[in-house]
Amino acid sequence: MPKRVLAGAVVTAAVVLGMPSVASAAEQLTVCATGCDHPTIAAAVSAASAGVTVRVTEDLSVTGATTVGKAVTITADPGVVITQTGANARTFTITPAGSGATISGLELTSDDLVRGEFIGVNGADDVTISGNTVYGPAQQGPMSGWVTNRAWTNNDVDGLTVTGNTLHTLRTGGYVDGGSGVITGNVTWNTKGDYLLGEQADFQITGNSAGDPSLPSEWGIVIFAVNETPYDVQALGAANDCLTVWDQATGETFLDGDCDGIADTAPPASKDECKEGGWASFNNPSFRNQGQCVSGVVTRG
């Protein structure tokens, strides 16, 4: 009984003295400028223990990155926007101690064009990035000259799950550098490369799709030459709706201009390619008969 009295006294003293709250595993900590448990995400994460949800309840400007070294969930109320105002886009750094953390339901952007990734997963396993919307300010000119901002990067991780996110108006959607995991059900557009697969990136990539057709990405999935995982380019393209694929090591590509899950064929280069049923093998463009195929060759010159 004395121990129970002492514990109650400590809690009472903490409230009276205005000491920061420390959440139990079943609690939720709120974040807003005034009137919430904490005024910053960093303060809430610092106070939280594993299993706690940190919830942002109103639009928030942040400068610099919050280090996530615990298995917490960071989320926000619908419509809330978190804006990075620092010199780098990095808003969250998930360290190995943050294995099991979740970043979910956030809308992340920056007020200026700045380099970096909004979410960096550095050696943390079993992290989930889900249901977020990530975008940067509009960029002008060729994408090759765009500022290198990204929704997320990861290195040396296992069990990363990236699902249900909307990523657009960025140089890169996600840069996957090492490790394993699942990338599924995400929508991307207006990037130079939606998903870049770096060295030793062994991920299951399925069910992702292209968004705004008026602002297509330059490439959907790019497999860098340094990657040691033998991806099947054609199967990868067919498993992701309307995303192009480019294996830089082999030069093999998957292009699907009509978004039917079937790789485009090059248009016929001569009338002879249209003969003996050859016209039926083309799909971008496709032809109804041999005569239409021949006419297409003549028109293109």
Image: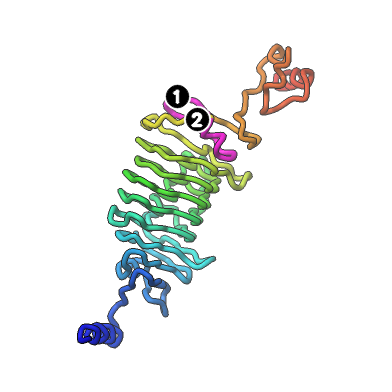
Q: What stretch is highlighted in magenta?
A: 235-253
User: Residue type at mark 1?
Assistant: Thr
Task: Judge depth for marks 1 and 2 and give the one in front.
Answer: 2
Dot label at residue 233 = 2
Q: Is mark 2 on a helix, strand or loop?
A: helix
Point 41% across, 63% down: residue = 74
The quadrant in which the C terminus is found is top right
Image coordinates of residue 111 in percent, x first then y, are 46, 59
The relative height of residue 242 versus residue 250 in the rendered view (above or below) is: below
Q: How crowded is mark 1: few (under 14 residues within 10 Å), some or many (20 or more)?
A: few
Name the image quarter holding residue 72: bottom left
Provide the secondary structure element on which disc 1 rests: loop
Q: How many marks are shown on the rendered structure? A: 2
> Quick one: 241 or 274, which is closer to the camera?
241
State the residue position of label 1.
250
**Residue at the far front in the pictured view:** 1
Residue 284: image location, x then y, percent: 67, 28
